[in-house]
Amino acid sequence: MKQGRLNMLNKFLRRLQNINFGKFLVVMLCVIVISQGLSINQCYADPVTKTMTINFTEDMNQSKSKTITIPNLKSIVDVSVNTGNVSHSVDGENI
């Protein structure tokens, strides 16, 4: 049993001696690079939240409308007014 293990170890060592160390090194580096590439976690920047204040002139007319363009708009979190009610709709970068 012990002799069989020694023979296997000797065969393994002979194979290692026959392997070109440069090729072995290149293969190992490729394995390391690929495994690192597979384990990279994707990092995304947190979305930027901005606040805009839009002023309307005071008028007796209770219904006002205005279109605002915000470049790279992804979503609207909140729309509010200090008096009355407000509604909004989003069409691309236009509110």
Image: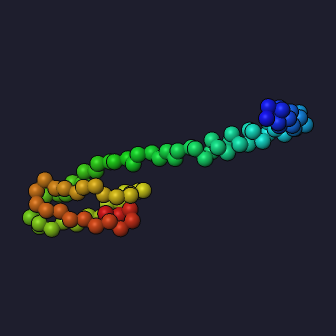
Q: Nearer the viewer, residue 76 or 7?
A: 7
Give the side of residue 52 with respect to residue 44, left or right: left
At 24% across and 55% down in the image, what residue appears? 78
Dividing the picture into quarters, in which one does residue 13 lie? top right
Dividing the picture into quarters, in which one does residue 24 lie? top right
Give the side of residue 21 with respect to residue 42, left or right: right
Q: Is residue 21 visible?
A: no
What is the number of callouts on the image?
0
At 10% across and 60% down in the image, what residue appears? 84
Give the side of residue 19 with respect to residue 95, left or right: right
- Which image quarter is the N terminus in? top right
Q: Is residue 87 visible?
A: yes
Q: Nearer the viewer, residue 5 or 10?
A: 5
| Residue 62 position in % (x across, y down) | 11, 66
- Residue pushed farthest front? 1
| Residue 79 position in % (x across, y down) | 23, 57
At 16% across and 56% down in the image, what residue appears? 81
Give the side of residue 26 with respect to residue 71, left or right: right
At 11% across and 67% down in the image, what residue appears? 61
- Residue pushed farthest right? 18
Q: State how the image is colored.
A: rainbow
| Residue 40 position in % (x across, y down) | 56, 43
| Residue 93 position in % (x across, y down) | 38, 62
Relative to 4, say whether 54 is above or below.
below
- Which image quarter is the C terminus in? bottom left
Relative to 82, say whether 40 is above or below.
above
Q: Nearer the viewer, residue 11 or 7?
A: 7
Dividing the picture into quarters, in which one does residue 7 lie? top right
